[in-house]
Amino acid sequence: MAGNVKLSLLARGWLQMTVTWTSGYDISEAYPFVEWGKVGAVAAPTRTPAGTLTFSRGSMCGEPARTVGWREPGFIHTAFMRDLWPNKEYYYKIGHELPDGSVVWGKAYSFRAPPSPGQNSLQRIIVFGDMGKAERDGSNEFANYQPGSLNTTDRLIEDLDNYDIVFHIGDMPYANGYISQWDQFTAQVAPISAKKPYMIASGNHERDWPNTGGFFDVEDSGGECGVPAETMYYYPAENRANFWYKVDYGMFRFCVADSEHDWREGTEQYKFIEQCLSTVDRKHQPWLIFAAHRVLGYSSNSWYAAQGSFEEPEGRESLQKLWQKYRVDIAFFGHVHNYERTCPLYQSQCVTGERSRYSGTMNGTIFVVAGGGGSHLSTYTTAIPNWSIFRDQDFGFVKLTAFNHSSLLFEYKKSSDGHVYDSFTVDRDYRDVLRCVHDSCFPTTLAT
Ligand SMILES: *[C@@H]1O[C@H](CO)[C@@H](O)[C@H](O)[C@H]1NC(C)=O
Ligand SMILES: *[C@@H]1O[C@H](CO)[C@@H](O)[C@H](O)[C@H]1NC(C)=O
Ligand SMILES: *[C@@H]1O[C@H](CO)[C@@H](O)[C@H](O)[C@H]1NC(C)=O
Ligand SMILES: *[C@@H]1O[C@H](CO)[C@@H](O)[C@H](O)[C@H]1NC(C)=O
């Protein structure tokens, strides 16, 4: 009756966690709630009511979502667990209270509350895009479109004890207008999302549809125009139709952008990105991460290269000055289905010859394509651009480990065996962030 629970964080992620799930009950039939408490506490568990949303066929923008792909999505419930103790273990269980007072229960799960912003503790993040879903027995597999999806999912389920939060940066189920595929996807990732905050970004396969206010007038969402994604998952955007948000996790600040909406200077999203990047106190949250679905930075994927841009047009032209001014450590993208990492770059130039151990003044941002979550792989140019340090045309995902305020480890793992195939470290103190480099301090205008 109810299932596929998914945890998520709020913008000031500490102290609060959300749980979202789907059921067949509207609130006139049963009241949804979550029962939760601190593991080992003597206090009785807390019951917190959930909000309920759904969406209708009429809110779909085109075919097949409005026609053969339509299926009633049921009711999507979200409850907020508040005043959590940082890093403590919690248990929780969803439930629905029927009119006669009896309760229909979901399964019991547990999670670890997030560290407070700036907290010094071991913090481990997973990042990938474009995963999709598949059937283990190959049944109903009409196109084998996401052949790496189950391997990525399985590696993350096996390794649940060794990371804390997941960012799936767009192209989630590839439902493309067949609404039931959202349930297939959320069931596939539920063993992960029931235990770890599962944060998402909007991709072309969630959002794009002609003449619906997006940046790309293509039909990649199969008529969904973002409605299922924006309802099925919680993420801390002020207006969830604008899929951009910030989230803090201990020593990390994440600024998640929406590459399916205009990001250029003068737009609402550009203001958000600047606000997100500029409001983090790097003394306490040194690790500043930017993420979006489409490649707004650098990729030597063959079709971007054929256009001569190595990116979505107007991506880095618009955003580079923000990444540089606010000294973004790493910018992640999906969309291209492979792995690629650049040197620390400023205006397409490597700012250092170092390849794996970065330290001292930070003069540029490292750009990473981590779009090999599962969908059919993309090819590269044969000539390797001089900013491209490592490429792998295979399925995989990235893990970031912050040991403390001055030491970060980056690892790229293949989904087939979970082993590390590329890595680098960043060792840096706050004074290294403070130093002015190209475009990163305000120009002095007080000269006499
Ligand atoms: C960054 O630039 C400064 C000054 O241009 C230089 O001294 C420093 O070595 C550079 N740092 C790295 C890590 O390349
Ligand atoms: C990399 O290639 C670009 C374009 O070909 C060139 O402008 C730049 O000087 C090169 N950088 C290095 C570090 O070789
Ligand atoms: C930070 O962690 C690294 C890696 O574990 C360690 O070598 C370093 O001593 C730590 N630094 C501080 C200031 O604790
Ligand atoms: C999935 O992983 C197995 C080994 O664990 C490997 O043999 C297989 O090729 C992988 N599948 C894909 C599509 O990469």
Image (cartoon, helix red, strand yellow):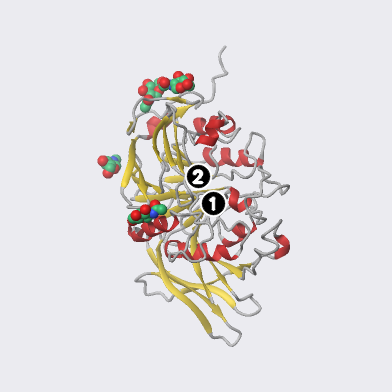
Looking at the image, which is closer to me, 345 or 443?
A: 345
Q: Which residue is drawn at 57% across and 50% down?
A: 202
Single out the residue that lies furthest toward the bottom: 100
CB within 8 Å, label 2 to label 1: yes
Give x and y (percent) for residue 156. 38, 57
Q: Does the residue labelled 2 lie within 8 Å of ligand 4?
A: no
Nearer to me, 121 or 73: 73
Q: Residue 113 carries which label?
A: none
**Earlier sequence position, callout 2 versus callout 1:** 1
Q: In this view, does 250 lie above or below 281?
A: below
Q: Is residue 419 above or below residue 351?
A: below
Q: What element carries label 2?
A: loop
Q: Nearer the viewer, residue 374 or 296?
A: 374
Please identify the quadrant where the N terminus is shown: bottom right
Identity of the residue furthest to the top in this view: 448
Total residue callouts: 2
Q: Which mark is residue 171?
A: 1
Q: Name the residue under label 2.
A: 334
Q: In which quarter of the image is residue 321?
A: top right
Q: Image quarter for residue 21?
A: bottom right
Q: Which residue is drawn at 54% across and 51% down?
A: 171
Q: Please provide percent x and percent y for residue 378.
A: 48, 42
